[in-house]
Image: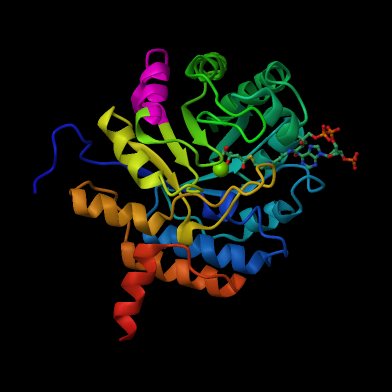
Amino acid sequence: MGNSSALPKKVKIIEVGPRDGLQNEKTFVDNAIKIALIDQLSLAGFANIETAAFVSPKWVPQMAGSDIVMSGIERKPGTIYSVLVPNMQGLEKALESKADEIVIFGAASEAFSQKNINCSIKESIARFIPVAKLAKDRGVRVRGSISCTLGCPYEGDIHPDKVVEVVQRMADLGVDEIDIADTIGVGTPNKVKSVFEAVSRIFPIERLSGHFHDTYGQSLANIYAAMEVGVSIFHSSVAGLGGCPYAKGATGNVATEDVLYLMAGLGIETGIDFERVARSGEFISQSLGRINGSRAGKAFLSKLTT
Ligand code: HMG
Ligand code: MG
């Protein structure tokens, strides 16, 4: 089968495992392991890796040591290393660590905003204004992430209008890219299309990304649906690591290996070495004592050993 004309020829995959994947691990993961994982992912060819989070260590203890991680990694020229930043305190650390991109993160749900960053949506935007401005002045890229765009663990359904409102506010801050996140993985393809169609009326589709957690097993279908409406940036997590500390029961992002397998089958270019990612998925799963959460990764590796 050839490449369908409705689908993009090329996609950007942002690897979020070292941040979104690891942040929910109960036991502290050694900085050396985090660094080794990121270095392996850099070699696999990702253009963008979400590496760390300069958030309060009281809120997310696993991300303490983000400065050590950022100074310990071997940076591949041209790769964007991104860090989460909730406020000015976080931005200062991000600038010191020479992050290439900061990610400010809000929500389309009031309740989730309170639980995750301890303020209302309106307050979060006000907090982000000086953060985005200073980052831009220093030549650092700014990405905006919006949680609960397809449903909220506290409020249930979220209307696309609510997502559009937050996208508009992020756009007003001058962000380079906006992530439409399904924090608890409840979205299904038609809903995904509706949300992207709604937000792309006010923000360019080429700068919108899909960040899908795979709790209900819908991520690959959702990625395909999003590509059909023109989305070409997706987030994924090696070995399907992860979860959100403020979304009980939510599992990790869609596994990177599974996304790469899908793209290869569709003839869509990613620029990423599948085998290296599969091996790093096994490395981190074994380091954490977890079962590898990637179906494609496991299938590929099992063929190598038989
Ligand atoms: P707060 O308690 O309201 O803040 O938390 P505060 O300003 O009162 O500070 C409280 C303490 O934290 C103080 O320390 C500050 O110094 C310290 P104390 O004086 O008590 O010793 N503090 C910091 N320390 C280090 N770095 C900082 C920082 N800021 C304050 N940047 C705050 C508000 C936003 C800080 C807190 O709620 C927080 O850090 N939240 C982060 C939560 C988080 O990281 N969640 C997971 C990431 S988001 C996600 O996973 C979703 C995403 O994947 C998309 C999706 O799937 O939906 C992106
Ligand atoms: Mg997430």
Q: Is residue 5 left or right of residue 128?
A: left
What colour scheme has been applied to the protein in the rendered image?
rainbow
Residue at image position (56%, 39%) is: 183
Residue farthest toward the bottom in the current orientation of the protein = 306
Q: Is residue 299 left or right of residue 199?
A: left
Q: Is residue 207 magenta?
A: yes
* Position above or below: 28 against 207: below
Residue farthest toward the right in the current orientation of the protein = 58
Name the residue nearer the viewer: 267 or 85.
267
* Position above or below: 297 against 173: below
**Residue 15 in the image, given as x and y percentages of width and height:** 46, 50
Name the residue nearer the viewer: 64 or 237.
237
**Residue 134 in the image, given as x and y percentages of width and height:** 65, 25
Judged by its main secondary structure, the magenta piece is helix
Q: Is residue 33 magenta?
A: no
Total marks in image: 0
**Residue 97 in the image, given as x and y percentages of width and height:** 65, 46
Residue at image position (70%, 22%) is: 124
Image region (quadrant) for ligand 2: top right
* Position above or below: 46 against 305: above
Q: Start and end of the magenta stretch?
A: 191-208
Residue farthest toward the left in the current orientation of the protein = 1
Q: Quadrant of the C terminus?
A: bottom left
* Position above or below: 7 against 46: above
Quarter where residue 234 is shown: top left
**Residue 82 in the image, given as x and y percentages of width and height:** 55, 43
Residue at image position (9%, 45%) is: 2
Q: Is residue 120 left or right of residue 200?
A: right
